C-alpha cells in the first residue's frame, strides 16, 4: 500500500464527508493505493455515525472510536499502530489541512529519502494574537532547545516513513514534538514543506491559549526524556555523586579540624550543616536515579486505551 492517512478527530461531523471526498479524489487522480484511518477521540456529535456511513461506500476506510476523549496524541498513536502504508500522512479533520499536499509529501518521503516531513503553514488564517504570534515564539524556543530546524512543529499535516511510526510512541500531549521523538529514535533526516493553510469552514477550534503553557512543560519533558529517558541514572546518579562527595569532603575537613587542630563547636558552624545537606540531597538524587532505572526497565507494558468500536477495511 502506498499511503495511510491518519486523521484524529473530535466533533467534526460537518467536515468529514467533504474531507473523505477530497482525499479520495486526490488518491484516484494520482493512482495511489491507500487507506484512510479515522480515529474518533470520543466525539459527542454524529461523527462516528458519519464515518460508519462513509465506510460503506469506501472500502479503503478504517476507523476506531475511543470510549472517551483521550487527546490527539493517543489518537495518533493508535492510528499509527494499524497503519499499513509505505508513507503515513497525518492531517486534522477540520479541512484546514489540504489533501492536495499529499502527492508532494509522498514524493519527499518516497523519492527524496526523508524519514519525516513536517508541513509549514507559512501563511496562516488564524487569529494573529491568539495563535500566530504565540506559535512563532513557541517554534523559536523549540528550535533553540532541540536543534531541529523546523518553522512549524505544531502543524498537523506531516508525512512519515512507515518505519518511523512503528518505532515511536506518542503519548500525553507530545504530538507537537513527534519530530523530536523521531530524531531521538534515530530518524534524523527531517524535512519541511510549505503547505496551504485554509480558514476553518465548520465548527470552532478545539485548542485554547492554555495549550502553549502545556506545550512548554511538554518541551521540558521531551528534552529530558530524549537525553536521559533510557539512562536516568546518568543524570540523577551523576548529580547525586557530585553532591555526596562535596558533602563528604566538607565533613572530613571538619573532622580533621577537630581531631588534629582541637577545634571544637563544629556543629555550630554553617559548614557542618552545608555538608550534611549535600550528603542527604546527594543520596536522594542517587536513589531517585536508581528507582528511575528500575521503572524504565520494567515499563514494557504500554498504556491501553478503551476502544469502543472498529471498522476494518
Image (cartoon, rainbow, N blue to C red):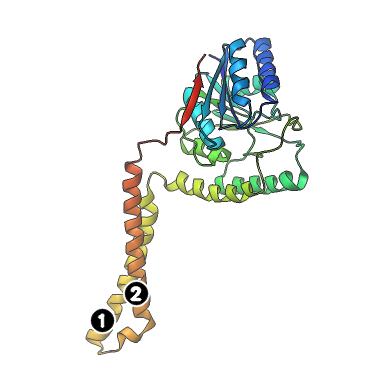
Residue that label 1 marks: 256
- How busy is the neighbourhood of tag 2: few (under 14 within 10 Å), some, or many (20 plus)? many
| Alpha carbon distance from label 1 to label 2 | 14 Å
Q: Kindly check if marks 1 and 2 are in contact, taking CB atoms under 8 A apart as contact.
A: no
Q: Quadrant of residue 5?
A: top right
Residue at the location (35% across, 40% down)?
299
Q: How many neighbours does mark 1 have within 10 angstroms: few (below 14), some (14-19), or many (20 or more)?
A: few
| Residue 165 makes an appearance in the image | no
At horizontal 34% and vertical 46% (from top left) the residue drawn is: 295
Residue 117 x %, y %: 60, 30
Along the line of sight, the residue nearer the viewer: 192 or 4: 4
Along the horizontal axis of the image, is 85 left or right of 15?
A: left
Report if residue 300 is visible in the image. Answer: yes
Q: Is residue 125 left or right of residue 57?
A: right
What x and y, as percent, mark residue 46? 63, 26
- Residue 100's image quarter? top right
Q: Nearer the viewer, mark 1 or mark 2?
A: 2
Label 1's element? helix
Taking the spot 42% from the left edge, 45% from the top edge, the residue there is 229
- The dot on residue 196 is none
Residue 104: % across, % down:
66, 22
Q: Residue furthest left?
A: 259
Label 2 SS: helix
Which residue is labeled 2 in the image?
Answer: 275
| Figure quadrant of residue 284 | bottom left
Residue at (25%, 81%) from the top-left corner?
Answer: 256
The foreground one among 240 and 200 is 200
**Sooner in the amino-acid sequence: mark 1 or mark 2:** 1
Would residue 302 be found to the left or right of residue 97 on screen?
Answer: left
Q: Is residue 291 above or below residue 80?
A: below
Front residue of 63 and 176: 63
Image coordinates of residue 190 in percent, x first then y, are 57, 33
Amino acid at each position: 500500500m502506498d499511503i495511510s492517512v491518519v486523521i484524529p478527530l473530535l466533533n467534526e461531523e460537518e467536515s468529514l464527508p467533504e474531507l473523505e471526498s477530497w482525499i479520495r479524489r486526490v488518491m484516484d487522480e494520482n493512482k495511489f493505493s491507500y487507506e484512510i484511518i479515522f480515529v474518533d477521540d470520543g466525539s459527542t456529535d454524529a461523527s462516528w455515525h458519519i464515518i460508519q456511513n462513509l465506510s460503506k461506500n469506501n472500502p479503503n476506510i478504517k476507523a476506531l472510536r475511543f470510549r472517551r476523549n483521550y487527546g490527539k496524541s493517543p489518537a495518533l498513536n493508535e492510528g499509527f499502530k494499524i497503519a499499513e502504508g509505505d508513507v503515513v500522512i497525518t492531517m486534522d479533520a477540520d479541512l484546514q489541512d489540504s489533501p492536495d499536499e499529499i502527492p508532494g509529501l509522498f514524493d519527499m518521503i518516497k523519492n527524496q529519502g526523508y524519514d519525516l516531513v513536517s508541513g509549514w503553514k507559512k501563511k496562516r488564517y488564524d487569529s494573529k494574537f491568539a495563535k500566530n504570534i504565540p506559535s512563532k515564539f513557541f517554534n523559536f524556543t523549540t528550535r533553540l532547545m532541540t536543534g531541529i530546524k523546523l518553522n512549524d512543529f505544531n502543524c498537523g499535516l506531516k508525512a512519515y516513513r512507515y518505519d518511523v511510526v512503528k518505532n515511536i510512541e506518542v503519548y500525553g500531549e507530545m504530538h507537537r514534538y513527534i519530530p523530536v521523538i523521531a530524531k531521538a529514535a534515530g530518524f534524523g533526516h527531517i524535512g519541511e514543506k510549505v503547505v496551504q493553510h485554509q480558514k476553518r469552514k465548520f465548527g470552532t477550534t478545539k485548542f485554547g491559549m492554555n495549550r502553549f503553557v502545556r506545550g512548554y512543560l511538554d518541551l521540558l519533558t521531551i528534552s529530558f526524556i530524549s537525553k536521559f529517558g533510557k539512562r536516568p541514572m546518568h543524570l540523577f546518579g551523576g548529580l547525586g555523586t557530585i553532591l555526596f562527595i562535596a558533602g563528604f569532603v566538607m565533613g572530613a575537613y571538619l573532622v580533621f579540624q577537630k581531631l588534629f587542630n582541637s577545634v571544637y563547636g563544629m556543629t555550630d558552624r554553617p559548614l557542618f550543616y552545608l555538608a550534611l545537606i549535600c550528603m542527604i540531597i546527594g543520596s536522594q538524587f542517587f536513589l531517585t536515579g536508581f528507582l528511575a532505572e528500575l521503572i524504565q526497565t520494567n515499563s514494557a507494558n504500554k498504556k491501553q486505551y478503551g476502544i469502543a468500536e472498529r471498522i476494518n477495511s
